[in-house]
Structure formats: structure tokens, C-alpha cells
Image (cartoon, rainbow, N blue to C red):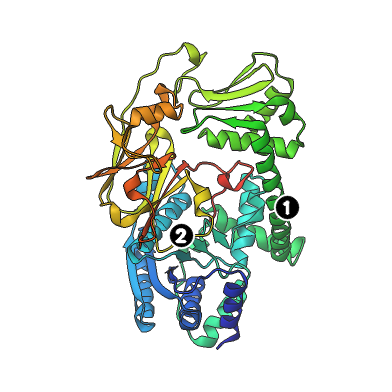
């Protein structure tokens, strides 16, 4: 076994990236990094007791090169005896439709395809080939665009329990040495030399300049700094979580409002106060900028009694009686003035979910993600209600996610029998104005779950469950100005 492959094995074992019997999707572009990852993992699969399926994406941006890349990946997969799925996405069209950069659009579509492949093959991990060089570039990229401490920790070895990066401490130089020693073919992506992309300018211009004029080991320095910040970030995140529980009161169900106890809040260190406010905003589906966090701090610290701050789409913060209340007084709507005096119009929404994957629900500012799991991870109960786990064999695709309708009934998990959804909302103290904004997941048999709140009893996990459908609901991703990982978009 080549020493490079042994190093990869040490990383997988040491970082506990693998559970015996797992299946991984390995993302292979045809470039040097991903081809090295494919061959190294294929060599380790038998000894480490895991299996692989290869996934390749054509982004529709380089038609003159895409065919050769797909052919190389398919031939390599066939030679290794592995299943291979190739997909094509239209990055340019998606970027225009969503108002995204091509880099951002490509990343979204690429990971969407990988998630689909994982669902079809019941894979529990997606392996990607980001290297130590990529990590240094990513840290500089985030610093240039603006980010908080969490952003400067770089890409995670394991993200969301799904995406793994076994090469994150391995340099490009070592990867190229392994490819040469094993005579492994690869393609070169011509777009990596186009300076229209910020990441390429960092790789081609900024890093070499810093190496030549400031620090020959700038890459190592950046990664070491990220490792230090990661440890500190974990400590601060834990401190902020403990403080949040003490000073913030949440309404049950869909977060129609939050209240901060100002005397206790103001006794916290500034770094913790910032994190509490950002967490509050995220709970209210608001993506806070640095300026908005500063305004909230100013309101809490020096604002007059009754002072009010308008955030976004009807979200208001009001200081009164030693409290800072943050809520949508009449639901999410882009209006000015005092929302308590503004009428509101309930809007119905519905969207078909043909298969597992990620779906945007623009009407309520949420992202819905569905994926199949072979087993539950430790501590899965604590992830409810953000993520609901259902017995996959009790539901039938296509599904529908829609808003509440009068007459809806379901059997709340743990309850003695069926109940009107309206009565359930009343028990959970969900204001009438918020009810049509709470997504309900259904199939032909009826309600599967009230997302973010409670699954139906028929979808409950039991000792006989063989396959699990994980359904998670999150605020839509946006910019990169946050103070925690929620505001960071990795590669």
C-alpha cells in the first residue's frame, strides 16, 4: 500500500469519519484531487468495511472538456468495479434565476445532485476532495468577503454529519506525487485559470504574492490559525448556548416571537451578546448582517423605553419593561410602520416533492431537505423539531408540502388519537396569523408531519423500522456576514 493511502487511512480512523458497513458517495470531477480520492478510497474500502458509489457532475459550463472528464470518471469507476452516476446541471440558467454567482449556483446544484445520488443508493456520507491548499484559499476568501470567527475556522472535516473531507490536511503536492507514482490519469479544468473568479485570483495571485513577499509558509500559518480558532469557537458556542437558554424565552411551535431578559443579557460579555442576538435572528428566519447586530446591541444597551428597530420583512425589535421583544407582529410582510396596526393577507402555498433532496420554500423563507438514512445517529432525539425522523416505509413519494387548510387532521406523535390541526396549533399557542406559514408534509395517505413541530404517529420510528426519512427545515441560506457557522457557505 502506498504511504499516501496509509495516510488517508490514518485520517479516516483517527477522525472517526467512518462507521463499519457504510456506503459513501465519492464526488469525482476528473481532476487530480478527486481522482486521487477515488483511487485511495477504493483501495481502502475492503479493509475498512465500506462501499462506494461514484458521482460526477457536468455543470454545463465547459462543453469542450466535459465529455472527456465524464468518460475518464466512468472508465475509472468501471475499472475499480464501482457504480457510477453522471448528471448534468445548468449552472448559468440557475444562477440567473436565483440571482447567484456562478460559483454559488454550481455549488448548490452540485451538492443537490450528490444528495440525490446518496438517497438513491442509501449512502450515508458524501466524500469530497478538498485539500489543505483549498483550506488556505477558503480562509482568505472568507476573510476578504467578510466573516466572523466561525468563518475563519475554514471548512470542516465533517459537515452536517454528511459531507466528509479526508484530504483536508493533505497538500496538492503530495496528491500529485501519489498520482504520478501510481500512474493515475486525470483532467485539468481550464476554468481554474480564469481570473474572473475570486477564488482563482486568490490561488493564482494573492497566495503566491504572500508567499514571496511576506511568509513562505502562509498556507500552513492560515491552517494553524484556523485550528486555533476552531477550538475557541467551540468554547464560545457552548458558552453562548448556555447564556441563550438563560436570557431568551421562545414561544412554542413556529417561532412567532422571542423575548430577551435585558438585565441578564447585558451582564454577558460582548462576544456572547453578539452570538445571542444572531441566534435570535436565525430563530426568526432573519439573516443578520454585522450592521443589524450592532443596531440590536445599541437598542438593548442604550435604546429608550419603547424604542423600536425595523429589521426585515415585518420583523421588529421593541424595547419595553426590561425586555427586548423580537417578533413578526402580523406575519412576514415587507411593510413599514407599526405592524400592530397593519392588516395581513394569508397566503396559501403548495409544492410537490417528487423525491428526496433539497427544496426552497420561498413563500416562507425556508429550505426543506429530505434524505434517507440507514440508521439513526446518537442523540437524534435532541435534533427535533428542526429535524424530524420518520419511518420511510410508511410514506409514499411523491409528497406535497403545503400550508394549513381548515379541516386538516392528524395523529400527533405521542398523543392518544387524531386531532384537528387547528386545535393542535391552539394547544401550542401558535397565533392564527402564523398558521398558514407552517409547512405541512403530506402524501396520498394524509399528513406525515407538521414540519418544525410534530410528526404524525403513523410515521413514528419503531424497533421494526428498516429505513429512515430525515426531514429538516432551515432558514434559507444567504450571505456570509454572520458570526456562526449558520452564515458560512463552504465549498
Task: Say which element carries label 2.
Answer: loop
Above or below, 491 against 361 in this view is below
In the shown orientation, is residue 64 left or right of residue 167?
Answer: left
Front in this rendered view, residue 266 or 176 = 266
Numbered mark located on residue 232 in the image: 1
Above or below, 373 against 476 in this view is below
Q: Does any portion of residue 287 appear in the rendered image? A: no
In the shown orientation, is residue 178 left or right of residue 370?
Answer: right
Q: Position of residue 296 (x, y in %)?
A: 65, 27
Q: Position of residue 452 (x, y in %)?
A: 44, 40
Q: Residue at x 38, y 67 (%)?
A: 55
| Distance in Å between CA atoms under marks 2 and 1 | 29 Å
Above or below, 490 against 80 in this view is above
Q: Residue at x 48, y 26 (%)?
A: 313
In the shown orientation, is residue 169 left or right of residue 440?
Answer: right
**Residue extending furthest toward the left:** 444
Quadrant in which residue 165 is drawn:
bottom right
Above or below, 133 against 448 in this view is below
Are the residues tagged 2 and 1 within 8 Å (C-beta)? no
- Residue under pointer 2: 376
Q: Earlier in the sequence, mark 2 or mark 1?
A: 1
Q: Residue at x 50, y 70 (%)?
A: 19
Mark 2 crowdedness (10 Å alpha carbons): few <14, some 14-19, many ≥20: few
Task: Say which element carries label 1.
Answer: helix
Q: Position of residue 51 (x, y in %)?
A: 42, 75
**Picture quarter with the N terminus:** bottom right
In the shown orientation, is residue 383 left or right of residue 416?
Answer: right
Q: Residue at x 36, y 39 (%)?
A: 416
Amino acid at each position: 500500500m502506498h504511504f499516501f493511502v496509509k495516510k488517508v487511512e490514518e485520517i479516516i480512523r483517527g477522525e472517526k469519519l467512518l462507521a463499519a458497513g457504510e456506503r459513501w458517495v465519492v464526488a469525482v470531477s476528473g481532476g487530480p484531487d478527486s481522482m486521487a480520492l477515488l483511487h485511495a478510497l477504493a483501495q481502502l474500502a475492503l479493509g475498512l468495511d465500506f462501499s462506494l458509489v461514484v458521482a460526477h457532475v457536468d455543470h454545463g459550463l465547459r462543453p469542450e472538456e466535459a465529455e472527456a472528464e465524464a468518460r475518464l470518471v466512468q472508465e475509472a469507476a468501471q475499472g475499480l468495479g464501482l457504480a457510477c452516476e453522471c448528471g448534468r446541471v445548468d449552472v448559468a440558467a440557475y444562477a440567473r434565476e436565483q440571482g447567484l454567482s456562478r460559483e454559488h449556483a454550481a455549488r448548490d446544484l452540485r451538492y443537490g445532485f450528490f444528495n440525490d445520488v446518496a438517497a438513491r443508493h442509501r449512502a450515508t456520507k458524501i466524500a469530497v476532495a478538498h485539500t489543505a491548499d483549498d483550506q488556505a484559499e477558503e480562509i482568505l476568501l472568507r476573510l476578504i468577503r467578510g466573516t466572523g470567527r466561525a468563518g475563519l475556522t475554514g471548512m470542516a472535516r465533517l459537515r452536517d454529519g454528511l459531507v466528509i473531507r479526508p484530504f483536508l490536511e493533505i497538500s496538492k503536492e503530495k496528491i500529485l506525487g501519489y498520482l504520478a507514482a501510481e500512474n493515475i490519469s486525470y483532467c485539468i479544468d481550464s476554468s481554474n485559470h480564469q481570473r474572473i473568479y475570486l477564488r482563482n485570483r486568490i490561488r493564482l495571485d494573492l497566495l503566491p504574492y504572500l508567499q514571496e513577499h511576506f511568509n513562505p509558509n502562509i498556507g500552513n500559518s492560515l491552517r494553524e490559525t484556523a485550528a486555533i480558532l476552531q477550538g475557541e469557537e467551540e468554547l464560545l458556542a457552548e458558552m453562548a448556548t448556555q447564556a441563550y437558554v438563560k436570557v431568551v424565552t421562545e414561544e412554542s411551535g413556529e417561532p412567532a416571537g422571542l423575548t430577551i431578559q435585558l438585565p441578564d443579557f447585558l451582564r454577558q460579555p460582548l462576544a456572547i451578546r453578539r452570538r445571542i442576538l444572531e441566534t435570535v435572528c436565525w430563530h426568526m428566519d432573519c439573516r443578520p448582517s454585522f450592521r443589524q447586530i450592532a443596531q440590536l446591541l445599541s437598542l438593548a444597551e442604550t435604546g429608550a423605553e419603547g424604542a423600536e428597530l425595523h429589521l426585515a420583512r415585518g420583523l421588529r425589535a421593541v424595547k419595553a419593561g426590561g425586555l427586548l421583544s423580537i417578533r413578526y407582529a402580523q406575519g412576514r410582510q415587507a411593510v413599514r410602520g407599526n405592524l400592530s396596526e397593519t392588516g395581513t393577507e394569508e397566503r396559501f402555498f403548495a409544492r410537490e416533492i417528487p423525491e428526496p433532496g433539497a427544496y426552497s420554500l420561498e413563500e416562507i423563507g425556508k429550505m426543506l431537505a429530505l434524505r434517507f438514512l440507514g440508521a439513526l445517529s446518537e442523540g437524534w432525539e435532541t435534533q427535533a423539531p428542526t429535524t424530524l425522523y420518520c419511518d420511510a416505509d410508511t410514506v409514499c413519494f411523491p409528497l406535497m408540502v403545503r400550508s394549513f387548510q381548515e379541516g386538516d387532521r392528524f395523529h400527533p406523535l405521542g398523543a392518544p388519537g387524531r386531532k384537528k390541526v387547528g386545535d393542535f396549533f391552539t394547544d401550542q399557542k401558535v397565533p392564527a396569523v402564523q398558521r398558514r406559514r407552517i409547512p405541512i408534509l403530506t402524501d396520498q395517505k394524509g399528513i406525515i408531519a407538521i414540519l418544525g413541530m410534530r410528526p404524525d404517529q403513523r410515521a413514528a420510528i419503531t424497533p421494526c423500522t428498516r429505513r429512515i426519512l430525515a426531514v429538516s427545515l432551515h432558514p434559507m441560506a444567504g450571505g456570509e456576514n454572520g458570526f456562526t457557522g449558520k452564515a458560512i457557505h463552504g465549498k
